[in-house]
Amino acid sequence: MAGYNIGNKSKNDPSENEYSFFLILPVIAVLAVIPLITRYYQYNTHLSDFEWIGVEDTKSDFFLHYKTVCLILVSIFMICAIVYMILGEERKFVWDKKLIPLAVYAVISFISAITSQNSYFSFNGIHEQFEPVWVLMGYFVITYYCFFILQDEKTVKRTMRWFMAGISVMVALGLSQVFQHDFLRTELGGQLIYPGGGLDFKFELGRAYLTLYNPNYVGFYVTLIVPLLVALLFTTKKLWHRIGYAFLAVALILILFASQSRAGIVTIIISLIIMLLCMRKVFIKNWKITVIAIAAFIVAFIGINAMNQNILLDRMKSMFSTADEVHPLENIFTNDDNVTIGYKGNTLIFKVEQDEYRNDIFNLTDGNGSEVPFSLSEDGITYVINDERFPFTFSSIRAEGFYGFGVTIDDKPWYFSNLMKANDKTYYALGAGMALMKLTEQEKSLDFLENHYHFANMRGYIWARTLPLLKKYFLLGSGPDTFLLAFPNNDLVGLYNSGHVNEIITKPHCMYLQIAVQTGVPSIIAMLVFFIWYLADSFKLYWKHNYDSYLPKVGVAIFVGSIGYMILAITNDSCVATSPIFFALIGMGLGINYKLKKKGLTN
């Protein structure tokens, strides 16, 4: 295999070699091809053993599984290529100590997977996530591979051409969604991703989601790529190149606005301001382009906002609502011999027995043991509680698949039973998907989160229940891709009060919490050290750079895009749809930084 052309194989620095397309191909796959993969996949969730989850055995996926498979194959190819280049071609091994924390994270992730009580999911991926340990370790492989081969200008330029091709395809798809002619909803698009036909789309027409599983991940994609496109505007004097880069950048901004990703909009503004400060001399020199770009951004925002009935401004206003919340329903506990309901500071206790005809006999008392009166309503089925402290109704339930009783609280029905399990007369509540679960006391978190469940678009509640998990899973976590199993999805009252009724929480909506819970606090420390080290090194390198060549402009764009990604990760999770792009780019950024410092081109 002719990997590259070198003069002295055993002595050459990797940045001095020209790589063949074959060796650049896996990077192109990560940046431009894998994000586009969308194909129907039916799978067994293997979650039926977890009775409290209530997820059906058979589910379908379109956006994640095949991306995961391809990413793992690409990672294996990269490992083989590195081994061949070093051993077969006597390529000099090159390393940057800033990669050490990421390597530590990969090792901890593997140990976490081995020791996890749910290691099957850690190695195979789980429902709605498909980010097993092989993918987490693959992020390190991708980062190192891109660092290894993407250090010289020619190789970076060749890679960028293919990356731009992939971005162009993504933009074409995104614009079709923006203007309500979604290609994936056409007959041809539907046949490409699901030959069986009859797709049901969960996102409203006009909302952009690309092929990234969720509109929130559009923010990740745009934040990583727009700074790169802006930088490339200043690397060429060819008018049609500049027009192309500008068109892609503006189109991606339109797509971001149409995705309604509020955090993405805020983050791209922050990222571009940082880029403006770092490249201030370049922007001042090209002030006309700068003015036009700012104007285009404003026009795009106004246009998309008008097309969607002022939704962007409305969502931005409500982004971080901090109003204190009052929840009348405080708790429900299913105990061995009763169901206890806490409501506005009062306690109601249900006990139910069956007579010889298997009819329910209810006994209601308050927290002091006093009897709570109730009476049968006119329908002859429903009971009304005759105590103003408890404005509830209840009735016996005898239906197919459920045998118990229901209590209606503030127009919300709750179902309980101590008759659904053989040899088990303790009480259970009915959750999402007909799951029977115990409702127990939940460990409290920060007061602010406990009083602001709807903070950051209902993330307040999820974070409130996730933070206490850090103590339980401090060292090695619950295992890669097992957040769904670690999260207290039996907290039905919390789910109800936060607006997550009948939902299963599969992710924490924060990459940092996701890592800390799944692979442990030491692993998130390692990842943060990697991030901070790279950012500090890049800031030192680019703040006073004169940007007189191609590589520094690409390098600072990756630096700025990485900042945006890390900010967005506060409110969004790692996902196989976008994370590989980030790690490939940060690997390229490390390679460019390494080359610039090695050649003394920092001024």
Image (tube, rainbow, N blue to C red):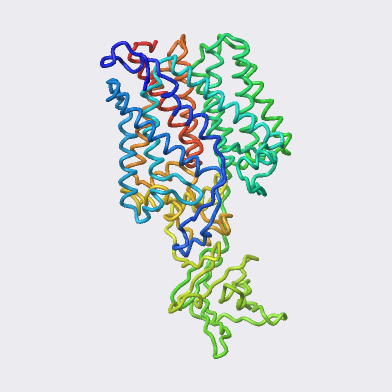
| On-image quarter of the N terminus | top left
Instruction: Give the x, y percent position of residue 50.
Output: 45, 62
Residue 259 higher or lower than 426, as above or below: above
Q: Is residue 208 visible?
A: yes
Q: Is residue 293 above or below residue 51?
A: above
- Measuring 38% from the left and 11% from the top, which residue is drawn there? 601
Residue at the far bottom: name it: 356
Q: Number of numbered discs present?
A: 0
Residue situated furthest front in the rendering: 1
Of residues 126 and 415, the one drawn nearer to the viewer in this rendering? 126
Q: Nearer the viewer, residue 246 or 42?
A: 42
Residue 491: horizontal and vertical position, in percent?
Answer: 49, 61
Tell me which residue sits at (62%, 18%) in the image: 244
x then y, percent, for residue 500: 57, 55
Whether residue 322 is visible to the viewer of this picture, yes or no, is no
Quarter of the image where one finds residue 5: top left
For the C terminus, the quadrant is: top left
Instruction: Give left or right: position of 106 versus 497.
Output: left
Give the x, y percent position of residue 295.
Answer: 66, 21
Quarter assignment of residue 396: bottom right
Q: Nearer the viewer, residue 448 or 300?
A: 300
Question: Could you tell me which residue is drawn at 46 percent across and 34 percent down?
Answer: 580
